[in-house]
Amino acid sequence: MVKTQHNASHMVEYGEPVGIIAAQSVGEPGTQMILRSFHLAGIESTISTSGLPRIIELVDAKKKPSTPVTYIYLESRINKSFEKSEELLKKINEVRMSGIAKRVLENFSKGMIKVVLDRQELEVEGLTAKQIASKINKELDLDADVKEGNIIISTHTKNLKEIRAASIKIMKMLVSGIDGAGRGTIRRDEKTGEFYLVSGGSNIDGIMGIDGVDKKRTTTNDIFAIYRLFGIEGARNALVFELKKTLKEQKISVDERHLDLIADAMTSMGTIKGVGRHGLSGEKKSVFARAAYEETMKHLIHAAAFGEIDSMRGVTENILVGKQMPIGTGSVKLAIKKEDLAKIKPKQ
Amino acid sequence: MPSKKIAAAYVYLNGKAIGTVENPLSLVNEVRAARRKGIVSGEVNVSFSEKLNSVSINADRGRIRKPYIIIEGGKSKLTPELKERLKNREINFNYLIRNGVIEYLDAEEEENALVALDEGAINERTTHLEVDISSIFGFTVNTSPFPEHNSLARHAMLANFTKQAQGLYATNFNQRFDSRAYILFYPQKPVVTTAAYDTAKITTHPSGQNFVVALSTYYGYNMADAIVLNRAAVDRGLGRSIFYKTYVDEERRYPGGQKDKFKIPQATADGFMGEHIYSKLSEDGIIEPEMEVSEGDALIGKVAPPRFLEENIGAGGLEEKMRDDSTVMKTGEGGVVDSVVFTETTGATKIVKVRIRSLKTPENGDKFASRHGQKGVVALIVPPEDMPFTAEGVVPDLLLNPHSIPTRLTFGHLLEMLAGKAGAVNGKVLDGTAFSEKGTDRIDNYGSILEKHGFEKFGNEILYDGITGMPFKSVLFNGVVYYNRLYHMVSNKIQVRSRGKVQILTHQPTEGKARQGALRFGEMERDALIGYGASLLIKERLLDQSDRAEVLICKECGSIGYYDHIKKAMVCPIDKSGAFEEVEISYAFKVLLDEIRSLHIMPSIKLKE
């Protein structure tokens, strides 16, 4: 049964305007979407953008999602243990100096910076003052020492600007975890009982490098991060997945093939392109189609300056001049000349 | 929080800072006491805002204010003795204001008040008492009976519909020349009134009628906010109204001593529309009263001087070249000339006002609404013999679909049906003011009245099908509801076009009723047809039935040429070869090419073959 439904006889016919149909199929239910919906507490959607803003973000091919999320799955040897998951989370969690410092005291006359550490935070992150001091020494090339549990740094300069710059640098310094991975929480899959991590960053290549992370299942909602790591096919699949997920959250059912088409169109050039002015619509071949969409003058002047020729193959430009559009019933043409038609004689 | 020394409060008079005060509350209390004694005008409002630490005293105009009974020491100042004297009409409302029983609060001072809804809710902190509980609603909501039983969204709709109702807006409507006026033939005061009807005296110029309503379907004709009317009721004047429209014209003066003149334009006038247009005008160029007029007839004949100065000096003729500027009946309008007024403006120019009257009998598509935000459009007017009827032979005026009640939560509508029925059989007007009685008590009261007159106490009755004569299987709820006829009527809105005027610039059909326009086949409609792949249908809609143009395109240079009728040859503006192809394009595209050319860009069309 399944096979017959998807075999060639059920394929879209030649000349079917699939693009318009896909646009309408996504656009119509889109009008029902609430701009910023209330979501239920405890569900993942609470942390990430959902609904129409998310769809716009995906379709416009935004470089960074407004709420990046990474789902980190663990290898089967550790994913049943909460302690081991927690341990792994500590390796990933992005901790910066500003997060564990209570106060920063700059002594400009001596050229010293004193960082008062938050003991509780240190304990939670499993770090010691000594570790941090050595990290400062190594990474920032400064002299750091531990005194009464706090860090004293001498900058070897008395220049105000340099001291202030050094203290800013220190506060921004990554103490532990992965740059751009964000801070995560541990979740438990109710069905399988396994633990997984959800973090608010999208440095997926950094996370993949950690031992114990299941590289097959770990994923993110950052399309461009996936594109950089897995290439265009991965990005295309991620795009479809995210579109589908967002629509499903809003209880809107759109046939998958429409979403496939949109994702294919966006990724067909090898890079991810949005559908708007700076993407697909802005790169149409026809001058008229581009001018009819947005920035009319820009396209007309460009066309004049470079002597562009509109070959009239698209829908918009043909409707504009009043010709039959080359799609649907307009996609067929008489292959024989009118004069030749008269020569054909019916068979006896 | 550590106790901070409170800074002196700012004092604002009419929004301007005038100083500070150490003890703001005592200032506020002092002003209030003075106001209640009559030392300070009752129009002054004073309030203290803790958040802003400021006292604001306002005596300027434009503040919305509302009266409240003053409570002091947990006791209403409106004592039983005063109430008794008020009842005997010894004193009035103004007496209470003068004597510090009632005061007006504005929005700012309200923030300092704790208002009790009724006397039972007064406690030691209460400062004021509502004059009546129904005054928590505004005027429009208070014209609705039982508003406390309706949903808030319906109140908003009701407020709009009340404003749109046709009625007797002014008793001197005969003497008035409003640009548009709607007068109901037989306005009635409602069987179920509210306190607002008396206080605002709207019973003397009502805007609706009491309809006998049955909650029933009628072969699907009242689905989705449609209503079914009884032909007999309509013929007897139910919802019948008159529509007045006034056309005005003036003999204007122009710089240079020229002026307009009222007269039948001579055939030589510029823009003369033809003899038949002016045939109904009298000698002075103005139409006579009681003349039947219809679309396109001239009402006021007028000639005006030409718009642009032309060389007509010494043209020999005494007759100056004039332009026709007559006032003509607009498309789709008709009626009888009701009244013509000929007078003078303050600028001493002649002015004519022609009032047209037309009868508006309820017809399919006219809009009605009850006082509960329940609107409906007439879908069918049924002959009385086909309407359902009760055992007593009562035939409803209107059939309302029962589905319009539950999802909209307008239980007030049902209550009004019951109350209206009770009032009608009893011959008494009933009160439906908000919160004046408990809902269950009301049902009991109306039920007992109905039972006394031999009706079922919940207003249900067996109805008989007018077509078969058989009783319906279910009892139907019926009663009397006050309905408004709203001024949205099909006869003022209907418009059709199959061909007609086009715009000069684009050669596309015009837009809008006043210009005999077509309906726009927009982008989304275009997309829908593309989605079907109906390429020829799109071409027909967007080209053949719109701005199709046949142009000559030069085979050499690709520019648009033309046919020169003097030389009897096709001409290309650029080269002289004379080889052309006739091509069908949209005129809008031709305009686009012209505009591009005006930007010093040379577009050219390359033709296949």
Image (tube, coloured by chain):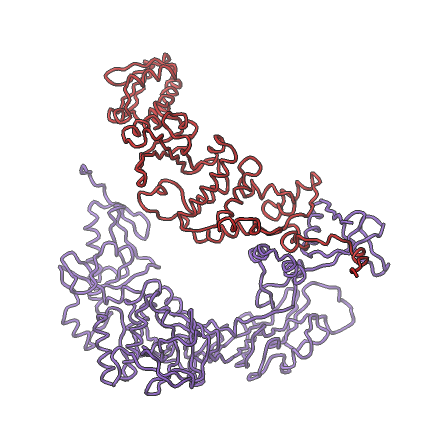
Chain colours: A red, B purple
Q: From what the image shows, is residue B154 above or below residue A187?
A: below
x%, y% of residue B487?
A: 45, 72
Choose between B590 and B174: the one closer to the eye: B590
Q: Residue furthest front?
A: A348
- Residue A81 is situated, as x and y percent measured from the top left of the image, at 28, 31
Q: Quadrant of residue A205?
A: top left
Relative to A327, is A346 on the left or the right?
A: right
Given residues B81 and B481, the one toward you in this image is B481
Residue B207 appears left or right of A310: left
Q: Is residue A149 above or below residue A61?
A: above
Q: Is residue B481 left or right of residue B241?
A: left
Query: For residue A201, what is the image quadrant?
Result: top left
Residue nearer the viewer, A294 or B407:
B407
Q: Position of residue B313 (x, y in %)?
A: 76, 66
**Position of A238 relative to A128 (above/below):** below
Q: Quadrant of residue B247?
A: bottom right
Q: Quadrant of the C terminus of chain A?
A: bottom right
The residue sitting at 61% across, 55% down in the picture is: B533
Q: Is residue A103 above or below residue B2?
A: above
Residue at the spot 70% in from the left edge and 43% down from the top edge? A309
- Left or right: residue B143 compared with residue B549: left
Picture coordinates of residue B54, whole percent (x, y): 26, 47
Q: Residue furthest bottom?
A: B392
Q: Residue furthest right?
A: B567
Tally the numbered discs. Answer: 0
